[in-house]
Amino acid sequence: MRKAQSDSLKIDSYAAESGFRRCDAPGCRERGEHRAPKARDRLEDYYWFCLDHVRSYNKQWNYYEGVSPEELEQAIRRSTTWDRPTWPLGAAAAYRKFVAGDYRDPFGALNGDEEMGAASGAGPTRPGAETAEGKAFAIMGLEPPVSEVELKARYKQLVKKHHPDANGGDKQAEERLKIINEAYTTLKKFLS
């Protein structure tokens, strides 16, 4: 009996402190020092719990409770890009823009660039030019047969030349580098 009185006095002394919160768990008289969100659509609205109750609340709380599988899939896809918008980078569409000259090139960096295999018609025809490997050879500016060492050396040259950091953060350079990376990956698979 004496212990219960001292506990209740202790709890009441907390109430005299400024900013005191009681635990939001029913029947709990401890301090509510740990916050927990009330719902996934109200993440700025909190319950305040003692340590024991916040632990049990966190164990049972499911952020995605009540979400359909389609909504969950969309949330996962958005979180892989940190909820930033993305655009498709199709290899075939990117190749056509890159080779056929359907790109905006205000500085003429791509025009007449024999290293990149621009479609000027001066080079010999490539075998299987419509295949993914043929397109990758054209993008890399290489002719088969090519060793992995030659491919890697060429890739390093192109990355140094077209990296966005080397071009003042240019978005077009970033897109060209993506195309080069896809071509390099395709040729690596082809050669192995």
Image (cartoon, rainbow, N blue to C red):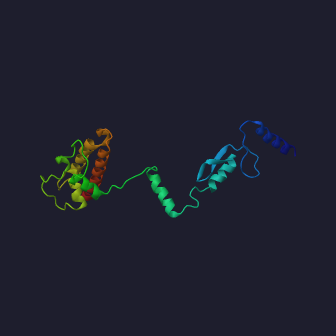
Residue 81, given in percent of the width and then of the height, sits at 43, 51
Q: Residue furthest right?
A: 1
Looking at the image, residue 77 sits to the left or right of residue 145; the answer is right
Residue 128, given in percent of the width and then of the height, sits at 19, 62
Residue at the (23%, 59%) spot, across then down: 133
Image quadrant in which the C terminus is located: bottom left
Residue at the (17%, 53%) spot, across then down: 119
Residue at the (35%, 56%) spot, across then down: 88
Q: Is residue 165 above or below residue 37?
A: above
Number of residue marks: 0
Looking at the image, residue 138 sits to the left or right of residue 83; the answer is left
> Which quadrant would residue 165 be assigned to in this image?
top left
Observer-nearest of 36 and 185: 36
Residue at the (28%, 54%) spot, across then down: 94
Residue 74, given in percent of the width and then of the height, sits at 47, 58
Looking at the image, residue 178 sits to the left or right of residue 38; the answer is left
Observer-nearest of 104 and 110: 104
Residue 89, given in percent of the width and then of the height, sits at 33, 55
Looking at the image, residue 24 sits to the left or right of residue 162; the answer is right
